[in-house]
C-alpha cells in the first residue's frame, strides 16, 4: 500500500440526514444535541469508508459548523483525528493542503439556491460571493482551495441541491444525497442509519476513482465580489485597505491569488456578521 494516505473529512451540519430547520443546527436546542450525534455518526461512516479504501489511511475530521465545536469526540471512529475550535487556518478545511483528497459531509447549498435546505454562504449576512464573476458557496470556495493545492474533492454529501451544486463545480465528483429538499426549511430524508450506510459505501469508491491532481478552479489573480444582505453590512469591510465599494450592498477586492481571495471572503464575514 506504500506511504499512508491522508484524507480530510470536513463535516458541516445543515446537510446531515434528518436535519431540516434552524433549531436543528442551533447550539442550545434539544434538537441540536440530538443532531450532533447524527453529525458524528455520518463523520464516522466516512472514516470507515476511508479505512475500507486503505487500512492505514489517516483520516482528519474537521468540525466545520458554526463554532466548529459540534462533533462528539468520544463517539467519533477512533481511527480519525479531530480538528475542533476556531478561528483556525482555512476555516472549514483546515489541513487541506496536506492531504491526498478531501470529502465534504453534511454540506448545504450556496446562498440564493432555491428550494435548498438551510442554504447560505458562510454567514447569513452574505447574499452572494463571486470569484472572477463565478458565484460560489461553501462547496465551491472550499473545493477551490483544495484544487489550488492540487487536492481533489472526491465526495460531497447533503441534500439533492448540494449534489447538483457539487457536480456542476467539480468534474467527476461523487455525491451522496441523504435527503431531498422540499423547501429551505423542509425535507424528506433518509433514515440516519441508511445515510451512513450510503456514505460508508461511496467513500472508498470515490477515493479509488481519484486520478491525478485537479485543474485549479481559479488560477492567477482573483477578483472577489461579495453582496451583503443590508447596506450597513457593506461598511465594515471598507476598513480593509484595497477594499472597494461597488454598490449599496456590494464590496470588491482584487486578490493576488485564490488563497488570499478565500481569506478575504472569510474576513468579510467576520467584519460584516456582527452588524447583522
Ligand atoms: Zn453549518
Image (cartoon, rainbow, N blue to C red):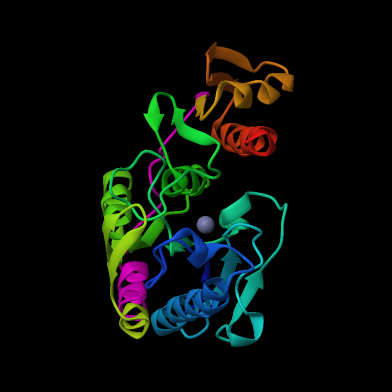
Residue shown at the point (69%, 50%) measured from the top left: 89
Q: Residue at x 62, y 36 (%)?
A: 276
Examine the image and state in which quarter residue 192 appears.
bottom left
Task: Say if 231 sits above or below 136 in the image.
Answer: above
**182 vs 43, nearest the viewer:** 182
Q: How many numbered callouts?
A: 0
Is 206 in the magenta?
yes
Residue 129 position in % (x across, y down): 47, 32
- The magenta stretch spans residue 49: no
Above or below — where is 247 with respect to 119?
above
- Residue at the location (62% across, 58% down)? 95
* 36, 207: nearer the viewer: 36
In the depicted view, which residue is nearer to us: 182 or 200? 182
> Would residue 182 be seen by someone viewing this image from the given angle?
yes
Q: Position of residue 156 (x, y in %)?
A: 37, 61
Q: Is residue 200 left or right of residue 7?
A: left
Magenta-colored span? 198-224
Q: Is residue 68 left or right of residue 149?
A: right
Amino acid at each position: 500500500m506504500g506511504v499512508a494516505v491522508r484524507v480530510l473529512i470536513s463535516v458541516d451540519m445543515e446537510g446531515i440526514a434528518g436535519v431540516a430547520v434552524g433549531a436543528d443546527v442551533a447550539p442550545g436546542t434539544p434538537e441540536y444535541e440530538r443532531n450532533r450525534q447524527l453529525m458524528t455518526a455520518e463523520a464516522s461512516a466516512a472514516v470507515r469508508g476511508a479505512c475500507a479504501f486503505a487500512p492505514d489511511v489517516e483520516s482528519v475530521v474537521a468540525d466545520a459548523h458554526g463554532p466548529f465545536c459540534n462533533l462528539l469526540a468520544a463517539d467519533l471512529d477512533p481511527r480519525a483525528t479531530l480538528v475542533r475550535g476556531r478561528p483556525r487556518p482555512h476555516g472549514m478545511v483546515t489541513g487541506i493542503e496536506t492531504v491526498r483528497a478531501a470529502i465534504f459531509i453534511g454540506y448545504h447549498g450556496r446562498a440564493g439556491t432555491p428550494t435548498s435546505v438551510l442554504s447560505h454562504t458562510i454567514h447569513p449576512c452574505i447574499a452572494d460571493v463571486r470569484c472572477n464573476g463565478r458565484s460560489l458557496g461553501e462547496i465551491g470556495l472550499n473545493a477551490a482551495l483544495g484544487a489550488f493545492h492540487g487536492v481533489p474533492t472526491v465526495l460531497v454529501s447533503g441534500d439533492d441541491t448540494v449534489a447538483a451544486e457539487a457536480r456542476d463545480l467539480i468534474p467527476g465528483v461523487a455525491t451522496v444525497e441523504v435527503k431531498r429538499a422540499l423547501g429551505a426549511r423542509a425535507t424528506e430524508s433518509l433514515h440516519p442509519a441508511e445515510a451512513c450506510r450510503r456514505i460508508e459505501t461511496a467513500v472508498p469508491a470515490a477515493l479509488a476513482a481519484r486520478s491525478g491532481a485537479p485543474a485549479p478552479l481559479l488560477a492567477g489573480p482573483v477578483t472577489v465580489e461579495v453582496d451583503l444582505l443590508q447596506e450597513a453590512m457593506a461598511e465594515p469591510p471598507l476598513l480593509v485597505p484595497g477594499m472597494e465599494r461597488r454598490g449599496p450592498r456590494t464590496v470588491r477586492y482584487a486578490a493576488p491569488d485564490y488563497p488570499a481571495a478565500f481569506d478575504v471572503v472569510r474576513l468579510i464575514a467576520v467584519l460584516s456578521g456582527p452588524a447583522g
